[in-house]
Image (cartoon, coloured by chain):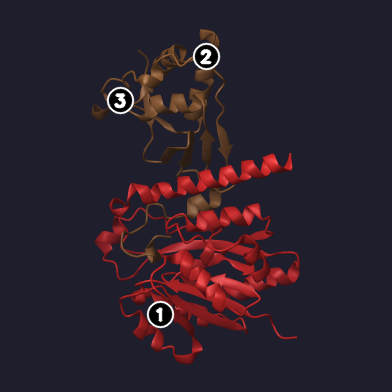
Amino acid sequence: MSAPLISVIIPTYNCAHYLGDAIESAFSQDYPRLEIIVVDDGSTDDTATLLATFGERLRKTHQSNGGIGSARNTGLTLASGEFIAYLDADDLYVPGKLTRQMACFDADPELECVQGQLIQFVSPELDADFAATLAVDTSRPLAAPMASTTLIKRQALERVGPWSTELTVGTDLDWYARVQEKLVKCLMLDEVLLHRRVHRTNTNLVHAADKNERLHVIKAMLDRRRAQQRDTQ
Amino acid sequence: MGQRYRVDTENIMHETIDGEVVIVNLETGTYYAFDGAGEFIWDRISGAGASLEQIIDAACAHYRGLPQDISAGVTRFFNALQKEQMLVAADDEADTAPATESTAADLASGAAFELPRLNIYTDMEALLLADPIHEVESDGWPNLK
């Protein structure tokens, strides 16, 4: 019996300078049955040119800018895999990531979602002075129940529902809250599965409203859970 | 007047949404929610800051109930906020302004005092700690993870 197909969905927006590395990290996986889907969410940089260099190896689509949630949802409509993985355009899978995760599904057929640790790295093009100012811990792994470490059964993903198309910084938080609410059986591996790129970061550029979006996601989550509790009483 | 305290804005994100205070501690990944008298207490602290004594006085003026019960309830809630590392002493130059002035909310509301309860949640700890809240740019969502 052949191995199940994994669809790797890579949403991207104006990230041509890092996207090639992300795609290569997916193509370099040793898992035998992969389809890699890039959803260009209305990029205005060199993304189209870059994608063309991958030829037919890559499935790709272009849409007008709708945000990362919208692009991930589009990717799923194109995906044929029984298992779905995500990769942000500026991050890198570690070698063997998907094989390691699939071994977990083999060991426990009830399992629906496998996630793991990430480790951050400072993008090499950053000048040393700027890099030194970044308050980023690149020395220790972080448990990361977020899209780019996730490998999930398609059925479970559909039970969780689509990614929010309204949110920006709260997208993964909202999604993971719903993963928990839908009682998706998850496993968090102790191993590093992802290298997260830190680049041109600047806290001062963050709008307070964006930061507080997470609080609104949490409030909505609490309201849902309380309503669910009332319904079951 | 006792030591005044304010919210540790370096590590604490907070907002009152539909009458409920929602807080994330970025250092620990713990989040919190409370309403009612808890919101009243938080409002006193989250402005210019306030001492425990000031908050107790305001709560006694605002709520109906025995002063000793109100004092005990406010103190317990205040201590819980401190234990969760949400507060810092308001002792620098910028914090020498008088505590939040009396507002309509400080006036007698006639509402009975109910013990405020700090709800503490740790189920999203890993995601909140890994979420690069300090690492976003303004141009393009690949960076707004």
- The answer for which chain carries disc 1 is A
**Residue A91: x, y in percent?**
44, 69
From the image, tell me which residue sits under label 3: B91
Sort mark 2 into few (<14), some (14-19) or many (20+) by Cα contacts within 10 Å.
many
Chain depicted in red: A
Sort mark 1 into few (<14), some (14-19) or many (20+) by Cα contacts within 10 Å.
some
Chain depicted in brown: B
Cα distance in 3D space between marks 1 and 3? 51 Å
Q: Which quadrant would the N terminus of chain B be assigned to in this image?
A: top left
For marks 2 and 3, the one nearer the N-term is 2
Q: Nearer the viewer, residue A220 or B120?
A: A220
Which kind of residue does numbered mark 2 sit on?
A: Ile
From the image, tell me which residue sits under label 2: B70
Relative placement, left or right, of A46 versus A119 is left
Q: Residue at x 74, y 39 (%)?
A: A233
From the image, tell me which residue sits under label 1: A20
Count the numbered circles shown. Answer: 3
Same chain assignment for discs 1 and 3: no
**Residue B126: x, y in percent?**
54, 52
Q: Is residue A28 visible?
A: no
